[in-house]
Structures are given as structure tokens and as C-alpha cells.
Amino acid sequence: MWRASIFTLFPEMFPGPLGLSLAGDALKRNVWRLEAIDIRAHGLGRHRSVDDTPAGGGAGMVMRADVLAASLDAALEPDDPRPRLLMSPRGKPLTQARAREFAEAPGVAIVCGRFEGVDERVIAARRLEEVSIGDYVLSGGELAALVLLDAAVRLLPGVMGKEESGAEESFENGLLEYPHYTKPRVFEGHQIPDVLLSGDHAKIAAWREAEARALTAARRPDLLKPKARKS
Ligand code: SAH
């Protein structure tokens, strides 16, 4: 079973929206498992403190390396094969290809940051891979972790129906998806494009491909550029 272990100061945030719909049904059917681990259980002193002021001064608080390491070490076997991730705006941006890799792994372990972030030493010592969900700053890693989990879980075998296998979706072939239409046939005077009602599958496929290309060129020309080689 695909297993997600989430290290957080707010375990109540999980499964949250992933308890509903596709992911929630799959959770109930044991296609995947979610374990939210309260970092504060390893907090220090009477107040179970998990953070402290930044070395060198400055605003905000930083999550302590020792507390987070203790939480990780208590919950993860040393030979746990799952990627160990830290949600972070400094990380490599999450992509559909990466989501697919996570879905193909045995699961994921995810640390959710809070405050200004986590002490750099625990990132290195526990070899956490930083993953970002976009160039903006959230107040904590929990929503970012939910985004990553949603993107991965829907790709697990048996979560989406065969018909929605995801193979044609945005990004899967380097393009944004073509436009969709359904009933009614006329909406506020606007018709469904004729070709989609023609029953000619080859013509429909060609139309969709052309639409996807045009849409991608207009909105995300960066996706059409040849990718820089991975080092
Ligand atoms: N001071 C940090 C931001 C801290 S935001 C900086 O400037 O880089 C607090 C936490 O929210 C982070 O530790 C991280 O876990 C999470 N977070 C914020 N933005 C994120 C993003 N774009 N992607 C993933 N996680 C994010």
C-alpha cells in the first residue's frame, strides 16, 4: 500500500480535503494510507517547544533541528525507501513528472515547515529534498503537502477510472489540455465546435492536438521550449 507520513505541527489538517472525493474513496479502500505525525510530541520542556529565535537575529522563529530530527527518527526506519521531502519555497518546483515519480514510489515522507522554516542542519543531516509548489509564500507546508499528495494519489492505480487515466491531461505530453464541451449543445448562443459532433475520431484527435498546441503557445510558451538538459 502507498504510504504517506506527514510531519506537522497541525496533524488535524490531514487528511482534510483528501478525505473526500477520489482521494478519500481511495483512502477508505486502502489504496493508500496517511499518517500525520505531530512534531510537537518531541517538543522540549513543559511547553513542548519546537522553535526558537534565528541565529544571527532577524524576524520570526525557526523550527529546531533536534526536535524535527527526533520526530523523523522515531517514525521512519533508517532503510525506509520512500523519498523524504520538505515542503519549501526554495525547493525544486513540483511538476506532473515529479508527481508521477512520487506515485510510482512506495509512498512519501513529507515535512511541513512553519514559521520562517527549519534549521538548515536537519535538512542536510536527514537528507530532506526540498519541494516547492510555486513561487509564492504560504504560512506553512501543510497545504503544499496536500497539493503534492493530491497530485500523486490520483495517479495511483485504481484511484481514477480507466477512462480518466490522465494520459491526455495537461502537462502529460508537454502541452496544456484541449478545451472540453458537454451538453447543452447551444449555451447562450454558443455552439459546440462542429468537429466534436462529427463522429470522425481521427479528425477529432487532430483538432484536439491543434487546440492544445495553440493554447500552449498562447499561454505557456515556456512549455514548448526545448528543456535544458538535466545535470
Ligand atoms: N522564510 C521562508 C518561508 C517560510 S513559509 C522563505 O522565505 O523561504 C513557512 C513554511 O511554509 C515553509 O517552511 C514551507 O514548509 C511552507 N511553504 C511556504 N511556501 C511554500 C511553497 N511555495 N511551496 C512549498 N512549501 C511552502
Image (spheres, grey):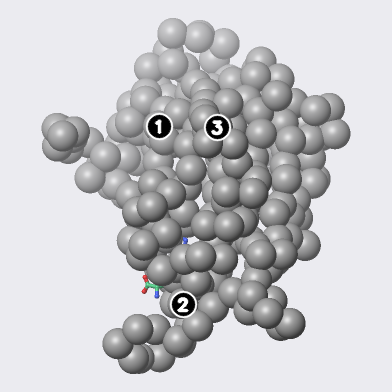
For label 2, the SS is: strand
Query: Image check: 115 left or right of 56?
Result: right
Report crowding for label 2: few under 14, some 14 to 19, many 20 or more residues within 10 A (C-alpha).
Answer: many
Q: Residues within 10 Å of mark 1 (few under 14, many from 20)?
A: few
Helix, strand, or loop for circle 3?
loop
Residue 222 to residue 184: above or below: below
Label 2 – label 1 distance at C-alpha: 31 Å
Q: Where does label 2 land, which residue? A: 62
Q: Is residue 34 above or below residue 185?
A: below
Q: CA distance from mark 1 to mark 3?
A: 22 Å
Amino acid type for the residue under numbered disc 3: Asp
Q: Quadrant of the C terminus?
A: top left
Please state the horizontal and vertical placement of residue 70, each as a whole percent of the image. Answer: 58, 57
- Relative vertical location of residue 134 with respect to residue 155 in this rendering, above or below: below
Residue at screen point 42% across, 59% down:
122
Foreground disc of the pair 2, 1: 2
Percent position (x, y) of residue 197? 58, 20
For mark 1, what is the residue? 97
Front position in the image: 152 or 129: 129
Please state which amino acid type lies under the numbered disc 2: Val
Residue 138 can be seen, yes or no: no
151 or 208, which lies in front?
151
User: What residue is shown with label 3?
Assistant: 80
- What residue do we see at 38% from left, 17% from top? 206
Give the mark nearest the N terminus, 2 or 3.
2
Asked if marks 2 and 1 touch (Cβ < 8 Å), the reply is no
Indicate the secondary structure of the residue bearing disc 1. helix
Task: Tell which circle, 2 or 1, labels the residue nearer the N-terminal end.
Answer: 2
